[in-house]
Amino acid sequence: MAELPRSCDCFVSLPPGSKEDYVIFGKNSDRPRDEVQELVCYPASSHAPGSTVECTYISIPQAEHTHAVVLSRPAWLWGAEMGANEHGVCIGNEAVWTKEPVDPEEALLGMDLVRLGLERGDSAWAALNVITSLLEQHGQGGACRETAEPFSYHNTFLLVDRQEAWVLETAGKLWAAQKVTEGVKNISNQLTIGTEICAEHPELRAVAQAQGWWSGEGDFSFSAVFSPDNPPARMEMAKQRYMGGTALLQQHNGSVTAEVMMSILRDKASGICMDSEGFCTTGSMVSILPRNPDMPCVHFFTATPDPSRSVFKPFIFSESVRSVNMVMSPQYGPGDPVRTQPRFQHQVDRKHELYKAHQTALTSPDAGVSLQETMRYLESQCLEEIEAMLRGEIQGQELGDLFFDCVDAEIKFYQ
């Protein structure tokens, strides 16, 4: 049996692809099987002029103001695999390999750029400009998993807000972007932008021509010019998932809802719900972004592996929102193996409370259909409250603690 492709997948549906007047975002984060993904939130903050921020490997100048964010991230790093900010911006990233060589030196991770875009951009376009500016200044590089074994890549991003989406694809410090204003779109571990380039690095075509990758005449296709001649096997295998994701989106085009997006992320036949040798889907996210700015955005996270056996729990930004310790991993300070030199010389336990309860429940003798049904019931109760809020039947501010309440209920159920 052929090995299933190992990659992440990002999806977006914009009206008229969505059933309601909402933009729907979704992502599965596929990472090493034993890696724990935590959920953290940070309030909006002001910072002193000249201050710096320590990212996963390097420090860069801090912005004077950062937006409130909620992040789903591998617990060992600073950045995020996916997340949202208080302005209704969502970002997810994907690994990709191109003709540009991967820099072995430590720089910004693509996951750092996800967080920086969310903290500094109040729209998808603004976040894209944040990411490309920092990419050009600091580059991308460094180990992308918690191991001394080298594993690095370039990145593609899906950036979404209430009005539009942007696909951003990179090759070293070079980049190209495509704007999406309607319908459905997905990305995976490959370059997808052809000639429909809406913005690009000012030296993109000159570099391609100087390298002999483009003649300088005729149409310029970013994917054709920058895709590697001999792509890694994981990049080739990801085409199956990309095509499967496209087919599922097209199947529901015109009727996409949060529930539909969750079902796509749970699809195992396509490989989108990953469970293959050393990799699996370690965290999932679905967001509802109403076009009406008076309606709150709703972000659902699993904070546990395998969405087909996890509960999506809703998060809403509000004045009363708070971090939930039950989905936050232990901290190890300066002695953390990611902070010591040489890095990753030993392992630490990063399991948070929900992760441990979830894993125990799934490996117990009682795990089975009844467990799945009860988990779906918990999820449906949350979805009903969210739908009532979006219909105006209850106030959004009443749901500031809904994520905490759902996590607490899930843990108690497992116990």
Image: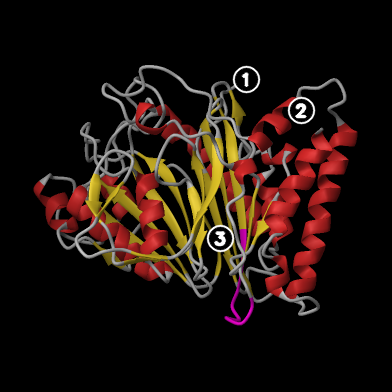
- Residue wearing tag 2: 362
Per the image, label 3 sits on a secondary structure element best described as strand
Which residue of the protein is positioned furthest toward the left in this rendering? 210
Relative placement, left or right, of 262 versus 169 is: right
Foreground pick, 35 / 153: 35
On the question of residue 341 being in view, the answer is yes
Q: Which of marks 3 and 1 is in front?
A: 3
Residue 91 x/y as whole percent: 47, 57
Q: Residue 133: x percent and y percent?
A: 24, 60
Q: Which amino acid does label 3 sit on?
A: Val
**Which corner quadrant holds the N terminus?**
top right
The numbered dot on residue 1 is: 1
Give the residues drawn in magenta, as a range: 287-295
Q: Earlier in the sequence, mark 3 or mark 1?
A: 1
Q: Quadrant of residue 61?
A: bottom left
Q: What residue type is labelled 2?
A: Leu
Earlier sequence position, callout 3 versus callout 2: 3
Q: Where is residue 272 in the image (x, y as percent from the top left)?
A: 61, 40
Q: Which residue is drawn at 70% across and 63% down?
A: 257
Q: Nearer the viewer, residue 54 or 79?
A: 54
The residue indicated by pointer 3 is 12
Amino acid at circle 1: Met
For mark 1, does the 10 Å Cα neighbourhood hold few (<14), some (14 to 19), or many (20 or more) residues?
few
